[in-house]
Image (cartoon, grey):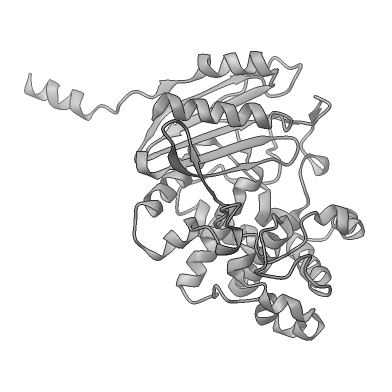
Amino acid sequence: MIWLALLLAQEPAAVRDLHDFLAERVAQAGMPAVAALVTNGERTLAAGVAGVRARGSEEAATLDDRWHIGSCTKSMTATVAAMMVEEGKLSWEATPASVFAERAERMDPAWQGATLARLLTNTAGAVGDLGGVHPKLWERFWKEGLAPTAQRSLLVETLTALPPERAPGSTFLYSNAGFSIAGAMMEQAAGVAYEDLMRARLFEPLGMTSAGFGAPEGEGAPWGHGANGKSVRPGRGADNPDAIAPAGRVHLTLEDWAKYARRHLRIAQDEGPLRRLHEPAAESARARYACGWIAAEIGDPPVQILGHSGSNTLWYSVIWLVPELDLAILTACNDGAQGAAMERLTGDLLAEFR
């Protein structure tokens, strides 16, 4: 009997199936599919998926599917940047001019205030609407067949030749371009492409084997859906260009995303230098924006969260960390028009598991 008791004690706790909970949301909001996972710092507590991989298809989405997480990529970029700072390969005070010294003379002097720390907290003043302000640059990313590193090099060269949209350090301005410049600085300092740097420094060490860039492709991958409700076949039109990969092009399974969330739960509960990643920049007092995280109070009674949402207009994802509860909630949908429904879903899951 003793051996039986020991065996039962070693059995992992059951993971709650969220399928029925999510199926109601699919029906209410008209989503193609939605997936969700709740974890603490050690293991998955609940997970589920409901719906189909493409609207009009009968192929059901599964928990093994990869989901595009858009701007939730930003904190991943900042995490690897912080590692490089700790190793002395970069500095929080590094600027485009100091990293790309050969181009410094061609850069507008105002960029001297655009430090790595400000680029990663959206307080460097980098342009907010990159495609709208620089449509010809955006078009070149698509038409010229440039490699990802060449796209980011062109982005840095084009943007730094002009003044930032706002004075660096003056205010918060959400900017994919700012994170892309930071990513270019990282790959310049490391001597490898940003994508390879992320695989080697983050994905592989955490065992995130499904993580990659762009819209997920291959047999069984869900398709994103636009505002018109139609699915978009994976390929060029299914995501933003490689130039802004550091701002929002990662895809992965929810379980692999949970490995990343657990890492940040540990960071939040530690007193080490990576805690800086969770501290909002002073210049973003109203936005309370940290390095790819937004600090907020949620719920009743309120709890402190670190969260972010992401969308490339075809997908929508949300991540909330609740360090005081040792809890993280991840949700993803293959429909970019479902932002409000996804935020409500994430909040309801917090209420369910707090």
Q: Which residue appears at 70% of the width and 17% of the height?
A: 30
Quarter of the rendering containing residue 16: top left
Quarter of the rendering containing residue 112: bottom right
Query: Is 238 placed above or below 100 here?
Result: above
* 273 or 218: nearer the viewer: 273
Q: How many numbered callouts?
A: 0
Q: Residue furthest left?
A: 2
User: In the shown orientation, is residue 279 left or right of residue 176?
Assistant: left
Q: Is residue 294 visible?
A: yes
Residue 204 picture location, percent across and down: 49, 53
Quarter of the rendering containing residue 45: top left
* Quadrant, the C terminus: top left
Residue 248 picture location, percent across and down: 67, 49
User: In the shown orientation, is residue 41 left or right of residue 278?
Assistant: left
Residue 205 picture location, percent across and down: 45, 54
Q: Is residue 220 visible?
A: no
Query: Is 27 placed above or below 340 here?
Result: above
* 62 or 289: nearer the viewer: 289
User: In the shown orientation, is residue 145 left or right of residue 277?
Assistant: right
Query: Is 94 placed above or below 352 here?
Result: below
Q: Which residue appears at 25% of the width and 26% of the height?
A: 11
* Quadrant, the N terminus: top left
